[in-house]
Amino acid sequence: MLREEASAVEDAVDGKGIDPAVVLGQVVSFALDVPWKADLVGERLVWPEGAGKDLEYEGPWVVVLSDRTRDVLTEIPDDRLPGLAEQWSHIEELSRYSDVRPEVMLSRLREFVGLARRARTNGESIYCWICL
């Protein structure tokens, strides 16, 4: 979520089912043409304080993604999005969802890339609100 300081306007996309480290991280790995690894996205817990130490805590919580992840998403050329969405639609972690057709995933990817571009333009980070 991107929050503008001057107003209470929020810029957000619905990322339900998109785990930032694993599912979004795979798009980042495809874009960079590198193998996926757990710390590729570089998420950091920002709320609630101490939740990362409580192994039984099930949320909600907020993480901030690394600026590198934001910038990788920002810099994906529009003409690469369909191919990346096609790759993304076949990852195992999305197999439990009912609609992962490439055109649906392309729409979702465009939303994430758009959010990243707006965040970087405004000098902001990308935050993810997560719950189980």
Image (cartoon, rainbow, N blue to C red):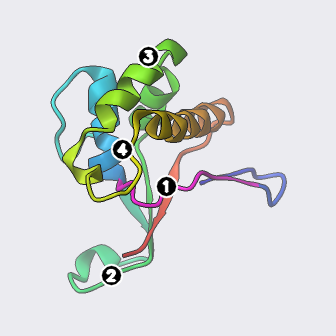
Q: Position of residue 29 (x, y in %)?
A: 26, 31
Image point (60%, 40%), residue name: 115
Q: Position of residue 15 (x, y in %)?
A: 49, 55
In contact (CB < 8 Å): disc 2 and disc 4: no
In the rendered image, which residue does mark 3 sit on? 80
Q: Could you tell me which secondary element the residue under label 1 belongs to?
A: loop
Q: Amino acid at mark 1?
A: Gly
In contact (CB < 8 Å): disc 4 and disc 1: yes
Q: Is any atom of residue 60 visible in this view?
A: yes
- Name the mark nearer the viewer: 3 or 2: 3
Q: Which residues are magenta?
A: 10-19
In the rendered image, which residue does mark 4 sit on? 24
- Name the mark nearer the viewer: 1 or 2: 1
In contact (CB < 8 Å): disc 3 and disc 2: no
Residue 39 falls left or right of residue 63: left
In the rendered image, which residue does mark 2 sit on? 58
In the rendered image, which residue does mark 1 sit on? 15
Name, please, the residue furthest toward the right: 7
**Dominant secondary structure (helix, strand or loop) of the stretch shown in magenta:** loop
Q: Amino acid at mark 3?
A: Arg
Which of the marked residues, 2 or 4, is nearer the chain's N terminus? Answer: 4
Image point (38%, 56%), residue name: 98
Q: CA distance from mark 4 to mark 3?
A: 16 Å
